[in-house]
Image (cartoon, helix red, strand yellow):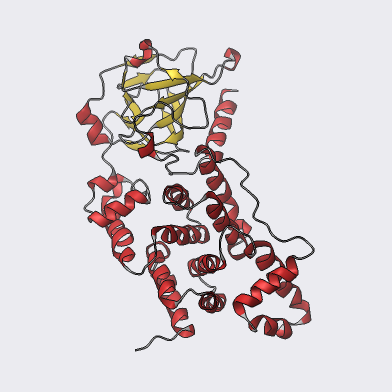
Amino acid sequence: MFYRVVWLLAVLALSIQSIHAQHVNENDMKGKDVFQQMFSQGDENPPVNSQYFIGRSYLAQLTHNKELNCPVYNVTFEPGCRNNWHSHTGGQLLIVTAGRGYYQEKGHPARELHPGDIVEIAPDVVHWHGAAPDSWFSHLAVECNSQTNRNTWLEPVDDEQYAEATSSVAAACSLSDKARENMKAWQFGNIISAADMELAEVFGNFAFDETQRYGDLDMRTRIMVTMASAIASQGKVLYGTLVGAALDNGVTPIEIREILYQAVPYVGMGKVADFVDVMNGEFVVRGIALPLERQTVVSPDDRMETGLALQTSIFGDNIRQMYEMSPADQLHIQKALSGNCFGDYQTRTGLDVRMRELLTFSMLISLGGCEPQLKGHIQGNINVGNDKAMMLAVVTQLLPYIGYPRTLNAVSCLNEVIPSDK
């Protein structure tokens, strides 16, 4: 029964949280007493417990049936709060549900924790855990072997130990000021482990400074096209971080959802399905009510006609030629493109036609192997007002995430459709 309860708790935590994403606007939470999260925050830890913490912490008991022999608590730490070094004779499980924190075993580097992370603490291992300096933090504490499990509290984690343990990768790296600023805005500093500092430096300076110097894309657009690329590339960890960054930089929940919906006809539900829970998990923690407002504008009776009209408005006479040239046994594919791809998806409100074509362009260059379709959508982008300079800026933005082969293929297609002056 114990393992069944733990498994269910882990599945619950993972299913509604995005992996390695910061689920709250941490700067807005400083100095506040309430931390928005999925479980009850509870009351401040009583003195019998708080004497072993630096900073304020809160405790909510979640299980009450003693026959289950599986006590579970939600523990919440304000920014900078941590408990003393301590150990458990029976071990402990931590299931991270919100915010950003740290766990450290004696004699080992600290591990940064994000929603969805699970920490398995073996019996008698001396350790501490708590919040990041700039973020609230919550985890479920599952008491293992509860009938015999006892805590041994030791000395506090002093300021010097805490500062050393919580130094972020971004702070420790040799980054340009611009790269550091953009990494913080994109919440990217916590994706690459401190164990790979050189990678964080090389990638950070290139992706968040050098490539972002090119083109006139604003941050919203950069984040949105990168989200589309992450879905096409199956970058679930990256996508989870980008959902939080998007919300903090003015991208609306509707726009975020429409990017995901837009991916279905181009990337396929087989690749998109895993991202739905990541997106909705972020929304739940942010207090965004689900389901979001419907954006469908077609009905089963007019989806084909409306989709074909939109398709024709973007690609012109090419659509008529595709229908005329299609063999009879393949005509149903052309109709699906009109009625499903364009009728069901691209007629939706929430994103305009220019942004949808730019997102499609981003997905196709990230997928690779779609050069014929990519060329068609390059022309489609031109037709709706996205010029070559904008598309080159998108390609440059995505270069660090999709690599050089797909980037060069995209540039080749751009030059074929829109030849550059020498």
Tell me if residue 336 can be seen.
no
Question: Seen in the image, is 208 located left or right of residue 383?
Answer: left
Question: Seen in the image, is 329 located left or right of residue 42?
Answer: right
In the image, residue 318 above or below residue 40? below
The residue depicted at 60 percent of the width and 13 percent of the height is: 67
In the image, residue 177 above or below residue 389? above
Question: Seen in the image, is 107 located left or right of residue 236?
Answer: left
Image quarter in which the N terminus is found: top right
> Residue 102 is drawn in which quadrant?
top left
Tell me residue 118's x, y (percent).
45, 34
- Name the residue furthest top: 48
Q: How many marks?
A: 0
Tell me residue 99's x, y (percent).
41, 36
Nearer to us in this view, 341 or 328: 341
In the image, residue 230 above or below residue 416? above
Nearer to us in this view, 319 or 108: 319
The residue depicted at 58 percent of the width and 49 percent of the height is: 276
Tell me residue 96's x, y (percent).
45, 33
Tell me if residue 367 can be seen.
yes
Tell me residue 34's x, y (percent).
43, 27
The residue depicted at 47 percent of the width and 85 percent of the height is: 416
- Name the residue furthest bottom: 422
Question: Seen in the image, is 155 located left or right of residue 280?
Answer: left
The residue depicted at 33 percent of the width and 63 percent of the height is: 212
In the image, residue 114 above or below residue 313? above
Image quarter in which the C terminus is found: bottom left
